[in-house]
Amino acid sequence: MALLQISEPGQSPNPHERRIAVGIDLGTTHSLVAAVRHGVAECLPDGEGRVILPSVVRYLAGGGRQIGHAAQEHLALDPENTIASVKRFMGRSLGDVQGAGKLPYRFAEHAGMLGIHTVAGEKSPVEVSAEILATLRYQAEDTFNDDLYGAVITVPAYFDDAQRQATKDAAQLAGLNVLRLINEPTAAAIAYGLDNASEGVYAIYDLGGGTFDISILRLTQGVFEVVATGGDSALGGDDYDHALVDWVLAQTGMQAVTAADKASLKVAARVCKEALSATKNVAFHAQLTGATVDFDVKAEQFHALTSHLTARTIAAVRKAMRDAKLAVTDVQGVVMVGGSTRMPQVQAAVAEFFGRAPLTNLNPDEVVALGASIQANQLAGNNAEGDLLLLDVIPLSLGVETMGGLVERIVPRNQTIPTAMAQDFTTYKDGQTALALHVVQGERDLVTDCRSLARFELRGIPPMTAGAARIRVTFTVDADGLLNVSAREQVSGVEARIDVKPSYGLGDDQIAQMLKDSFATAESDMRTRALVEACVDADRLVMATQTALEADGDLLDAVERSTIDGAMQALVSAKSSSDAATVEAFSKALAQATEAFAAMRMNRGIAHALAGKNIEAL
Amino acid sequence: MNLQSNDFELFGLKQQFAQERAVLDDRWKTLQREAHPDKFAVQGAAAQRVAMQWSARINEAYRRLKDPLTRAAYLCELGGAPVNAHTNTAMPAQFLMQQMEWREALDDARDIAALEVLRQNVEVSKQALLQQCAQLLDVQNDCNAAVPLVRELMFIEKFAQDLDRGFDKFE
């Protein structure tokens, strides 16, 4: 990436080079990859022409694994090692997962994120998700017969920081360059809005396999402004299945004993639920250990026993509308996303709330991946005239713990990202030299009711009387919706900062190591290719640096200039070393040497662009 | 222009209370088109960091300018008369009486209609104060005189939030 840091803002160094960028919908039930080809967004098929990949990974003894359709066939046969709906476990501890006892897995409990015991050892949800993402990556690379430049990955709008970070880690582990995490309803709005050239306020109701999102968006001339968002990151089609299983068992007086029983019932419930979307009466059939369940389910029975779930989604819709300060009559259209919106009772409830029939003219399974691919194409710089701009929001408030276990909110929910907000705190004891900060996310007033994201300490505050120190805590939420926290004592200048990483302990180093391990199959031709690529990158970097120096060399003083010149010379000499790692190391050194320069140029570029816009306005 | 420019400079607007919401919305989007990190997605970490600072700064300015209350408070601060809402809480007795009446009315409200009446009363008071602010800030150029009104508006805003939560009970 290094060379690109010093190209002209808004321009790629090689304007004619097309970068292959995809959109990936990493879903609870299934996942898809899409890309813009010949100007049209389309889902990319696997070798057998299927675009939907079931989000199921089966681990085999001896280290092998099956992913997708092959794994799905074993859900009931090998339930303990066949992991489905892993998205529900992302960034979650065992205590967070409701109804874990009804699932056929052997969980491992950890402080941050749970693990799952399989025949191939313990697996983290991040690793399982990475398998799915890697499969989609290969699927895309096979389609294009080329390497991917990068991907936009979608996450539920209501995902908190830990869930987003876990998703980004999984993508990194799958060897993907994450261009951006975007919210699923926003992605759907892109696909929908661009298709229909819509303007005005739209509600996106997204009920997936395991998550529910509602986003209220305002569309104007290519700008997708999220006004408010809400939802429940643990409510989806799976819950309708569980409710049906519980009800059928209660009606028949039968019980699920083994892991295979649980898995069979879940599969049977899903089949029954899907059939009930089209017919009024369906036979629920499942084979248990030593017994068979056969039970007739009527549509109205299914609707009644799941009405509390549908009602929960409507309550979240009402809250989002209130946050948006909009009335139902302000809404121009309601878009349905996610396979679970095929249920007639869900469509009826949404139609009743908004007083209009929801729009279902795009395939609810594909629309998220399609929208993500359109954004990926633009982020990769392939669509120079593109005027798509996403202004999304943070779904949940962020704050710190204060005295008495109360939350002091620093960033309220539904703030447009990126955002930086600060709050001043002080010491409460004379001579206090450290301050512990506990970062939490959620809407409740008590720390214990919110999600704990990170803890860190600001040390080395000079001893002062209580209340004399001025400690400014700044929360920065980037365009991916990820949080970074810093603290600075204003009088002494003492600082501390933390990238909020969920406490499951996958550091950058560990991810790098896992990546290395998975690609450790070193081959000599790979080495040759690596050297060629490293030299090409080095050439580009040197060229870009020279161009940048010609344009903005005046920003540098003599010392800064000679540091960059030195690093550039060293890289040119290193190219003759015939070792990719050496060339890369010197490239990295040059990139580091030019980093501050790149930032100065960016600053000048943006300030110039904004000033230009203001002159136009006046 | 730099990151320290004030909100009005950043948005290219005249430093005054009277502002058109549609113009603000339009300026916000125009500026974000130039500075948003998405525009620099292929340019690496340093570019992302700089773009994020600008983009967050533009969002901050937009947030402050679009709400008449925060806009008024900001103008007082720029004019050398900070509102100091946290340290300076002394309010006129008459205003406090009205606040107490409203609180009682909120507690006594038994239906949506009662809350709706209250909401209209609050809105009328708020609009009257905002008009006075406009007069003081834009015509008389008297920030010091506007400060007590801004503080009253902050109280009213807090009450309006509690009132909104009151509606929840009946929905």
Image (spheres, coloured by chain):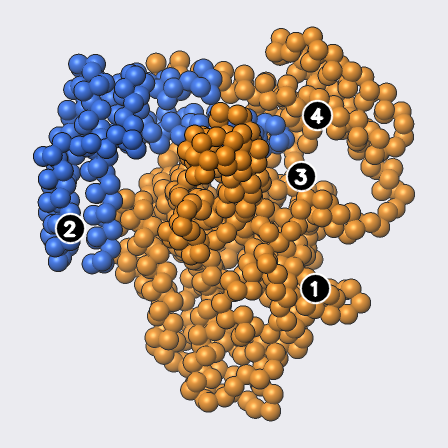
Chain colours: A orange, B blue
Q: Which label is found at residue A122? A: 1
Marks 4, 3: nearer the viewer: 4
Residues packed near mark 4 inside 10 Å, few (<14), some (14 to 19) or many (20 plus)? some
Question: Which amino acid is tagged 4?
Answer: Gln
Q: Nearer the viewer, residue A537 or B107?
A: B107
Residue B71 visible in the snapshot: no
Q: Amino acid at mark 2?
A: Leu
Residue A569 in the image, given as x and y percentages of width and height = 81, 17
Tell me: A508 left or right of A327: right
Which secondary structure, mark 1? Answer: strand
Closer to the camera, A494 or A100?
A494
**Can you identify the residue that label 4 sits on?**
A592
Instruction: Kindly check if marks 1 and 2 are in contact, taking CB atoms under 8 A apart as contact.
Output: no
Q: How many marks?
A: 4
Give the residue at x 84% y 30%.
A582
Give the image location of residue A373, x and y in percent.
56, 44
Other residues around mark 3 within 10 Å, as few (<14) / some (14–19) / many (≥20): some
Q: In the rendered structure, which amino acid carries the disc numbered 1?
A: Glu
Q: Residue at x 66, y 77 (%)?
A: A77
Residue type, numbered disc 3: Tyr
**Mark-to-mark CA distance, 4 and 3:** 22 Å
Describe the element under mark 3 as helix, strand or loop. Answer: loop
Looking at marks 1 and 4 on the same chain, the residue that comes earlier in the sequence is marked by 1
Residue A594: x %, y % from top left: 68, 21
Which residue in the protein does label 3 denote? A149
Calculate the distance from the C-alpha at mark 2 to the C-alpha at mark 4: 60 Å
Nearer to the camera, A81 or A35: A81
Query: In this figure, which residue is indicated by the disc labeled 2?
Result: B106
Residue drawn at (88%, 46%) of the image: A523
Which is nearer the N-term, disc 4 or disc 3?
3
Q: Mark 4 — on which chain does it sit?
A: A
Which chain is disc 1 placed on?
A
